[in-house]
Amino acid sequence: MAKTIAIVNQKGGVGKTTSCVNLAAALQMLGSRVLVCDFDPQANTTSGFGVDKVSSSPNIYDVLINDADIAKAIVSTPYADVVPSNKALAGATIEMIGLDHREYRLRDALAKVEGNYDFIFIDCPPSLELLTLNALCAAQSILVPVQCEYYALEGLSDLLSTVRIVKRSLNPHISMEGVILTMYDGRTNLSLQVAEEVKRHFPGQVYATVIPRNVRLSEAPSHGKPVMAYDSLSRGAEAYEALAREFLEQNGVTPTRKD
């Protein structure tokens, strides 16, 4: 069965989608079977894999609200399989209020396909509401991107408090997968200081691989590709491959590079 990981941080602009797209693509390149569930109404993960977020149907909204078959919603790309999202998902929070087992809608849907994958990543919206709660109830662990900027730790206490509540009352199996340092610039004292502060708050849980500021990481989504397909020799591509290898090692998996 797949290990399901929610990529979550209610603060926007920290590299959640960038990390979701590129870590998933790097893992598939190294031989893992990967499914990405775009759970953000902005649908940037969907377009980041080159999938049309307007025309894709059924999508994750249809799965949640209309009980569409998730297997029919999956779109295969050269980089990973994707359950697409679109702006309709923004209304799902209100529409789910009256549904049975509303916190487990995503978990129950993913359970139907988890046998086909090694890892399932859920790209969460930048908020702590019912969509994110569904992701936390579906996941076995959380991956937290933290940008190396001044307000890096802002709001993380709220996130961890939410995770503790979920663990206590809804999903006792959820744990911390790890913390990814993003937008790192080793030339600045600020990045170094933030990195040390994050490591102090999350001892033993911060990945050794850091994700640098890199223009190729910013350019790749506009071409509908992960960075390793856009520019495999860029610092961003090398960083996400290194992160994927570290991730696999921590999960006891030996990478097998595909041709």
Image: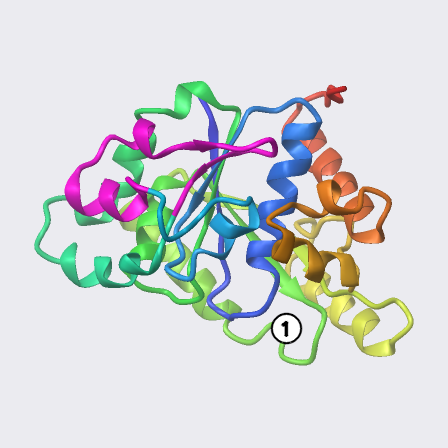
Q: Is residue 129 above or below residue 76?
A: below
User: Does the stretch in magenta take in 101?
Assistant: no
The residue carrying pointer 1 sits among few (fewer than 14), some (14 to 19) or many (20 or more) residues within 10 Å by Cα, namely some
Coloring applied to the structure: rainbow
How many numbered callouts? 1
Q: Residue furthest front?
A: 55
Q: Three-letter amino acid code at disc 1? A: Ala
Query: Is residue 143 something one can see in this rendering?
Result: yes
Which residues fall within the magenta stretch? Answer: 57-84
- Return the residue at label 1: 152
Residue 130 locus on image (x, y percent): 27, 58
> Image quadrant of residue 79?
top right
Residue at x 83%, y 68% (from the top left corner): 185
Left or right position of 95 against 21: left
Residue at x 8%, y 55% (from the top left corner): 98
* Closer-to-camera residue (162/144): 144
Residue 153 locus on image (x, y percent): 60, 72
Q: Residue furthest right?
A: 187
User: Does the stretch in magenta take in 83?
Assistant: yes
Secondary element type, mark 1? loop
Left or right position of 126 against 49: left
Residue at x 44%, y 48% (from the top left corner): 52
* Closer-to-camera residue (173/143): 143
Residue 132 locus on image (x, y percent): 36, 56
Left or right position of 116 against 77: left
Residue at x 40%, y 57% (from the top left corner): 40
